[in-house]
Amino acid sequence: MNLFRLRRSAAVTVAEARRAPVSPVATPSYPAQRLLAGAERQAQVFVRGQGSWLWDDAGHAYLDFNQGGAVNSLGHSPAVLSKALSEQAQALINPGAGYLNRELLTLVERLCQSTGSDQAYLLNSGAEACEGAIKLARKWGQLHRNGAYHIITASQACHGRSLGALSASDPLPCKRCEPGLPGFSKVPFNDLAALHAEVDSRTVAIMLEPIQGEAGVIPATREYLQGVAKLCRELGILLILDEVQTAIGRCGALLAEHSYGVRADIITLGKGLGGGVPLAALLARGNACCAEPGELQGSHHGNALMSAAGLAVLDTVLEPGFFERVQDSGRHLRDGLSRLAGRYGQGEVRGQGLLWAMQLQDNLAPALVDAAMHEGLLLNAVQSDVLRFSPALTVSKGNIDEMLLRLARAFARLHTLQQARRDMPA
């Protein structure tokens, strides 16, 4: 390991990053055999990050336009988050289950004030938040809808990996999802008539993502989401919005519901709320605030350390002009991706804010992600024919332009490899 590289100034320029060549596949310095098989991982061992850049233990620099699947909302190791964690760790980390702490209460208050919610509950992951939303909706059904428990979700939805969240998800985008609990049904996304036809006396809630991230960054149309909200009001059922991926500025507003002009009864937050540390939240409004002590469970939810991180992130994104900068950077990214898609004969570019996808003509996404890795660029293939881009909300236009250059080289690299295979004798 090069200790000089690790100790130097955190500031980095594109030119500096370009000087470090990227090996085709880095050889880990640490054995991985003892790591229990779980998520598939690349071979690189990362040791340092700053903003939009990551460095592995061989000193190679990578431009990160995945950011943990939109988890690192402020980029890698932002000063405001590092400072908050450091100061809080010296004061109080976790007082234990059953005790309040100042940071938890402050974050809950700030979340409710900024989102127009009445109550909030902190959790560790987006999946837990979605699980909590399901429990809360069914409790509401017992109290206000004659015991209704059935929840309608959308085809290709992905609401997390807990059993209840898996049950609300569609196996297609989740790939590894298994059949879950009863009491859920799926209808086509952006099809209001199909949704209406599925509602009956058992229905307690409709649960949707404003943008289906794992399915390939598929936005709800404004007419559809507003129609769903109106349908829920007219029929007296709850609207649950899963904003684990779309909130905390990712779509150019604190909540995606703001850009759609709707208001949900229950909202789930995660990913970007902690800026890279495990933190999620469940927001409730009106008489959906019906949980009793112990019903949402969780022993370490809202500990002081994670709550301090959430406050640092929330304070940052609520600074004047932050969302406008996200929108401006998002337009710059969209325009650049659209030019590349046209140049290389690919499909549409879709998304909002700084959450975008490029539809590919063939199932090239995994191979293109590998080609991009060779060019020092980290991307995510959410589907076999879809590339997803979720950079830091603080990404510069210079880094966006550098990403586009590296992506163009990845397309060229992949084309060369494909041509070489075609030219090989049978």
Image: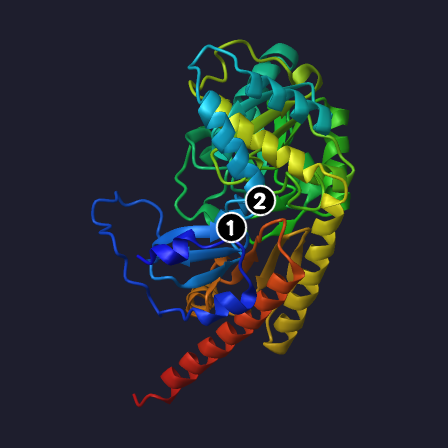
Q: How many marks?
A: 2
Question: x and y percent of residue 412 in the render?
Answer: 50, 79
In the depicted structure, whether residue 25 falls above or below residue 78: below
Left/right of residue 28 with respect to residue 405 in the rendered view: left
Instruction: Identify the residue position indicated by label 2 in the image.
Output: 73
In the depicted structure, whether residue 339 falls above or below residue 86: below
Left/right of residue 332 with respect to residue 298 in the rendered view: right
Which of the two discs, 1 and 2, labels the residue nearer the N terminus?
1
Number of other residues with Cα within 10 Å of mark 2, as a class: few under 14, some 14 to 19, many 20 or more = many
Instruction: Identify the residue position indicated by label 1 in the image.
Output: 67
- At 32% from the left and 44% from the top, the residue drawn is 38
Question: x and y percent of residue 227 in the render?
Answer: 76, 38
- At 44% from the left and 82% from the top, the residue drawn is 416
Q: Residue 309 versus residue 375: which sits nearer the camera?
A: 309
Q: Residue 60 versus residue 358: which sits nearer the camera?
A: 60
Q: For the residue labelled by badge 1, is the local secondary structure a helix, a strand or a loop?
A: helix
Q: For the residue labelled by badge 2, is the local secondary structure a helix, a strand or a loop?
A: loop
| Residue 237 visible in the current orientation | no
Question: x and y percent of residue 175 in the render?
Answer: 42, 49
Q: Residue 408 versus residue 345: which sits nearer the camera?
A: 408
| Contact flag, marks 1 and 2 (Cβ < 8 Å) | yes
- At 42% from the left and 57% from the top, the residue drawn is 55
